[in-house]
Image: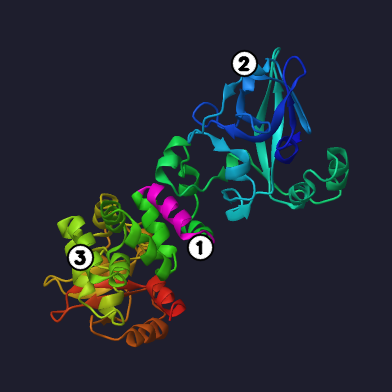
Amino acid sequence: MLFATEIVGASAYDSQAHFVGRVREFFVEPAEQPNRISHFLISRGRFQPLVARYDQVSKVAPGRIDLNVSERALEAYKPNEAWLAVQKDLLDQQIIDTEGRKVVRVNDVDLTEMRTNEHVELRIAQVDVGLPGAMRRLLQGIAPSALVRRLQGKLPQRSIRWEFVNLIEPDPLRRVKLRITHEKLEDLHPADLAEMMEELSAAERQGIIASLDEETAAKVLAELDERLTTQIVETLDPEKAADILEEMAPDAAADLLADLPKETSEELLEEMPNLEAEEVRELLSYDSSTAGGMMNTEFAYVSEASPREEVLAWLRKQDFNLEQLDTIVLVDAHAQFSGTVPVARMLLAAPEQLMSDLKTEPLVSITPDASEKDVFELFDKYNLRMLTVIDEEKRPIGTVTVDDVVSRLVNA
């Protein structure tokens, strides 16, 4: 095992054992191989910096690399945005540990050797985020490598395997060139990802949201602090922002747009499909501190005369958020609100049983102009998981769920 701190500043010698210079940087070319050190930047005094390819290296040891070609065979160094610089882009930089679900700072990079008949390749095995790496950085160029290695053995190890590292690159063009994707982040719970993003800079947060798929980005924005969410959406491309808003629940989209300048809000609504935009506009017409301002207009409602099996067959064809599908709203023959049925109760009922036989008591609802205080009191009094909002004709127009109440209380 070698460490990046042992390679940076190492003396480089060509095949005739002539001193070529010192290693100032080394690179990974992700498009070719995601963890192989592909090039070494070597400089000496006023001479033009040179670059050695991985197949021109015959031996690597702490403080020294040997080449299998003469100095003349090396090419002049030219910056390449498709190369990941280990020292510049990794050492002392923040990364996301997708396995530990946290943001950490890289102290060193652990490298393994792969030997062939003519050359040796270095591969990134893991990044060091613990005390040994910090100590190596502190003593780099001061103490001999052998002494540093003895000292580090007494310290607790803390490393992250390279496959669990997600790099943070705010520049979209460079992200593409480095082939940095956020597929691993999309597998994380939105709340975990939001918590990690709050530790990043504004540009880094922007870069991550811009590269996530719209559905994941919508879930993450719903978990972020409102102030950060507003900052992100304001600087996103309007088309991308509208696509994300379309994936959000109408009430969440309305809450977000309400915090934006009116001009920006209108621009994003214009970019959204007409049906979704109208739903959000309707919610924006309510005061945010009322039941109407809290409700979600996407909810499941069926006729109270429907058999349980028929309702289940219908639900299977719908595109509801299953994680939030907790209660079914019932309407009577006049389309007026007539009750609610918990999904769990419906699942345990007989196939032919009517929904009207399964509804809970008492019949509780609220009007959209009712205050959030009234909403809280009803949830507390009846231990509700969902509250139906009805219009003047007693027709259901939305629901307030327990997570809406919790979020409002937490942010109060």
User: What secondary structure prevails in the magenta region?
Assistant: helix
Circles 1 and 3 in contact, beta carbons < 8 Å? no
Q: What element carries label 3?
A: helix
Residue 266 disc label: 3
**Residue nearest the observer in this picture, 349 or 328:** 328
Quarter location, residue 87: top right
The residue carrying pointer 1 sits among few (fewer than 14), some (14 to 19) or many (20 or more) residues within 10 Å by Cα, namely: some
Above-or-below relation of 19 to 312? above
Upstream in the sequence, badge 1 or badge 2?
2
Quarter location, residue 356: bottom left
Please identify the quadrant where the N terminus is shown. Answer: top right
Q: How far apart are marks 1 and 3 (CA)?
A: 27 Å
Upstream in the sequence, badge 1 or badge 3?
1
The part of the chain drawn in magenta is 199-213
Residue tagged 1: 198
Residue 235 is situated, as x and y percent measured from the top left of the image, at 34, 59
Q: How far apart are marks 3 and 2 (CA)?
A: 61 Å
